Image (spheres, rainbow, N blue to C red):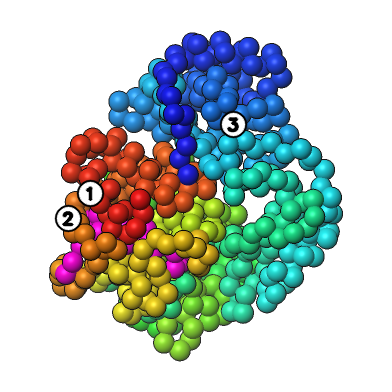
Amino acid sequence: MISASPQRRRVTAAAALAAASALVATGLQIAGPASAQAAASPRDKAVDAAKANVRAHAEEFGYGSGQELAVKDVVFDADGTQHVRFDRTFRGLPVVGGDLVVHQSKDGDFEDLSRARARTVAVDKTTPGVSPRHTADQALKKTDGVKDATSRPKLIVWAVDGTPRLAWQTTVKGTGAHSEPVAKVVVTDAANGKHIASYDAQHQAKGKGHSEYTGKISIDTTKQPNGKYALKDPKRGTITRDAKNVDADALQPSSGKLLTDRDNEWGDGKKWSTNRATAGVDAHANTAWTWDYFQKNFGRKGIRNDGKGATVFVHVGDKWDNAQWSDDCFCMFTGDGDGNRDAEQVDLDTMGHEMTHGVTSATAGLVYEGESGGLNEATSDIFGTMVEWYANNRYDKPDYLFSDQSTPPWLRRMDKPSLDGSSADYWKSGLGDLDVHNSSGVGNHFFYLASEGSGRKTIKGVKYNSPTKDGSTVKGIGNKKVAKIWYRALTVYMTSTTNYKGARKATLKAAGDLYGKTSTEYKTVKAAWKGVNVR
């Protein structure tokens, strides 16, 4: 949710620094030095100014004694405007749902703010009434069916629902029925042990389809000292490995086997291939397309915008018909299908979807439950789809049918999400209670309406018919513009607890920034949200 003071005033960076100094004297704590160094980079200067602005506007940010800030991301606009994103701690404890963004001029003058739902993140006590051992046992009971499960409680301040409280955040790791990696987060009240929330730590696409092969394609490899070539992308840093169908708990970035080849000619191009490199070719190529899409359209260098590539595992688990992204190991897992009709989960939009989970984690950090979880999934569907449009591969023509190659005829679709039997077309009360893959339908439907408009049409040979909740007509502005608006909203305005109403505000702000508040683009974004009943 985006919050801002009703009376916004411009405060210079110098005034903010002066006010900050006064507040420091009263005992407020903040991570890192506030003073700029002579050799400080533009990023460091922006961060220092943002910290000072938080101190100077402590009441608006809900910033008080015992809190510290940790910089997470910095975005510079073309005109020099700065957007500095912070996570918060309280008395050394991470605050989940306490993140904020400082918007400031190129000179560091305070202009606006975005923050998660909770205005304050303070709690009365930081000593738990429930032991970590008891918490771990309760978390394991909440995750029955996970094999070889291990649990790791961590004391936090939980502020996602707007009411800060001391909580245990327990991550349960293990393997599922098909040896796929499973990681669940269970949140319990540290005072009384009552359950607060549960959600997946690893984001899943829930695919069920055939392996998508990208045909004859050039892939970037690295020649090894032994003369063999390896699926190590020297441009992007991505490494593709064969997991050897091992259990999930054995998978770390160095696990499995690096895929190598002596003549640098990989795979056999067949579906249901017995050549283990074939899935590696699709995974490696589609990961590269995803990287290139984000870099060429948004200047983003990799998932964390730090130029570092991820590890991608193919052949994970035993008859595992899915794909996942894991922040813990900064890697992606893809299964071999169910062994009956479904093959490797390495199709283009699935790979783009999973990598986007990493981008979301590195930016807004949308909590993977409730409406924010639906927005997390919608973001991955949106950019997975955009990677498909960017690649424009003749074997997987661009469309608004998510995972249509691996799950014929499609796993989810954007023009009318409810056609899958589970997803929501429009916002309604209680939407956040749905599975995040189903509540994502509202975001997907918005994206389609804003891109292509309402009603019947045929696009690149595919027939669509997109209705609106109120029967209104929406004229699209093209998916490139909508994706640009969504990316700016994600990286600049959304926070961990943004819901659909907050996403509307964030995308309207982004559209205003990019095209102006009187533009067709701004009006279309507004009309598309109205069309999915978000007002």
Query: In the shown orientation, is residue 40 left or right of residue 426?
Result: right
- Hey, what amino acid is under mark 2? Lys
The amino acid type, in three-letter code, at marker 3 is Gly
The residue lying at 48 percent from left, 86 percent from top is 339
- Residue position for label 1: 524
Where residue 370 appears, as percent x and y from the top left, is 52, 59
Q: Looking at the picture, tell me which residue is in the foreground, 229 or 504.
A: 504
Amino acid carrying label 1: it is Thr
Q: Is residue 437 magenta?
A: yes
Provide the residue designation for mark 2.
Answer: 475
Q: What residue sits 25% from the left and 59% below the top?
A: 449
Residue annotated with mark 3: 62
- Helix, strand or loop status at disc 3: loop
Q: Are marks 2 and 1 in contact (CB under 8 Å)?
A: yes
Q: CA distance from mark 2 to mark 1?
A: 7 Å
- Label 2 crowd (10 A; few <14 / some 14-19 / many >=20): some
Give, as a single range, the part of the protein colored magenta. 436-456
